[in-house]
């Protein structure tokens, strides 16, 4: 484990890329937001996952992140108040042309999107992300990528939290022209299930801890980049 120094991280957060951060929860350096989307998919799944992750991240890294997420729609002006977006679900996702355009602008300005497949999301989210970046393709991240080694080391990549199709967990990314990871897509892993309270999915405690640690890595990486 590598603990992020409080002063260093605080300075990073002060330099947050968004001028509208005051629109988010007050008295915290930043707030994450869960994306509410159309199409019928359950964007609201694993409702306690993010509060559990944020509590863990606040305790383990001293990040000054709000303890609960906000809900944001891609067409909302509030989108730019959040440096970190989280999107999950089991089913269909639909973005209008305006939503896809706004998400593209948000990401090009320095925003970060974490897509967490809760099983059944893959076909739909890949189709919609082609609307956002038709010129870019998801690429699998190597295990030595920084996102696997920010606060905690994951030499073998993502933890496998849920069986799904019994395929190995994979982390895919979309990068900007300068090589910055804008979108991180966790596939066949289901980190959100691991973040939920242990009583919900009854995952082994060591696996749940790994899921929380990997989620913390993603938060730290997003704020450092």
Image (tube, rainbow, N blue to C red):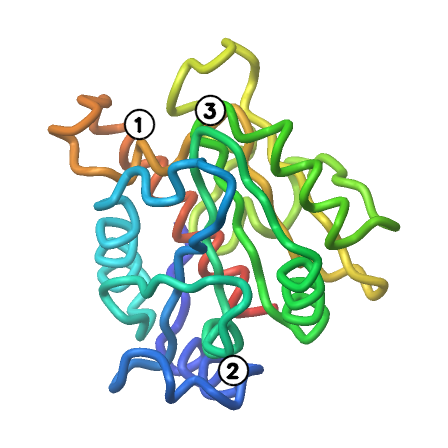
Q: Is residue 123 above or below residue 45?
A: above
Q: Residues within 10 Å of mark 1 (few under 14, many from 20)?
A: some
The mark that comes first in sequence, 2 or 3, is: 2
Residue 161 location, x and y as percent?
38, 24
Q: Gap between marks 2 and 1, in whole Å?
A: 32 Å
Exactly how many numbered labels are in the figure? 3
Q: Residue at x 39, y 65 (%)?
A: 32
Q: Left of 162 or right of it: where is 114? A: right
Disc 1: which residue? 207
The image's mark for residue 119 is 3
Question: Closer to us: mark 2 or mark 1?
Answer: 2
Marks 2/1 in contact by CB < 8 Å: the verdict is no
The mark that comes first in sequence, 1 or 3, is: 3
Q: Gap between marks 1 and 3, in whole Å?
A: 18 Å
| Residue 196 found in image quarter | top left
Residue 66 location, x and y as percent?
27, 71
Q: Residues within 10 Å of mark 2 (few under 14, many from 20)?
A: many
Q: Gap between marks 2 and 3, in whole Å?
A: 32 Å
Q: Residue at x 18, y 22 (%)?
A: 202
**29 or 47: nearer the viewer:** 47
Q: Left of 80 or right of it: where is 40? A: left
Q: Residue at x 64, y 36 (%)?
A: 143
Q: Is residue 160 above or below residue 56?
A: above
**94 or 132: nearer the viewer:** 94
The image's mark for residue 170 is none
Residue 70 location, x and y as percent?
32, 65
Instruction: Indicate the secondary structure of the residue bearing disc 3.
Output: loop
Residue 179 location, x and y as percent?
79, 59
Instruction: Indicate the secondary structure of the residue bearing disc 2.
Output: loop
Disc 2: which residue? 16
Image quadrant containing the C terminus:
bottom right
């Amino acid at each position: 484990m590598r603990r992020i120094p409080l002063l260093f991280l605080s300075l990073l957060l002060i330099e947050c890329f968004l001028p509208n951060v005051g629109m988010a929860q007050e008295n915290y350096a930043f707030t994450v937001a869960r994306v509410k989307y159309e199409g019928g998919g359950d964007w609201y799944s694993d409702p306690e996952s993010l509060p559990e992750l944020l509590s863990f991240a606040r305790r383990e890294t001293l990040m000054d992140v709000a303890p609960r997420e906000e809900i944001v729609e891609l067409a909302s002006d509030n989108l730019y108040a959040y440096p970190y977006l989280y999107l999950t679900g089991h089913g269909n996702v639909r973005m209008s042309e305006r939503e896809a355009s706004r998400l593209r602008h948000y990401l090009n300005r320095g925003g970060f999107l974490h897509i967490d497949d809760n099983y059944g999301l893959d076909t739909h989210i890949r189709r919609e992300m082609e609307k956002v970046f038709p010129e870019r393709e998801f690429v699998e991240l190597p295990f030595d990528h920084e996102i696997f080694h920010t606060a905690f080391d994951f030499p073998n990549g993502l933890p496998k939290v849920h069986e799904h199709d019994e395929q190995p967990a994979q982390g895919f990314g979309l990068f900007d022209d300068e090589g910055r990871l804008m979108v991180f897509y966790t596939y066949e892993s289901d980190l959100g299930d691991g973040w939920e309270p242990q009583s919900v999915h009854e995952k082994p405690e060591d696996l749940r801890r790994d899921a929380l640690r990997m989620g913390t890595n993603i938060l730290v990486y997003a704020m450092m980049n």
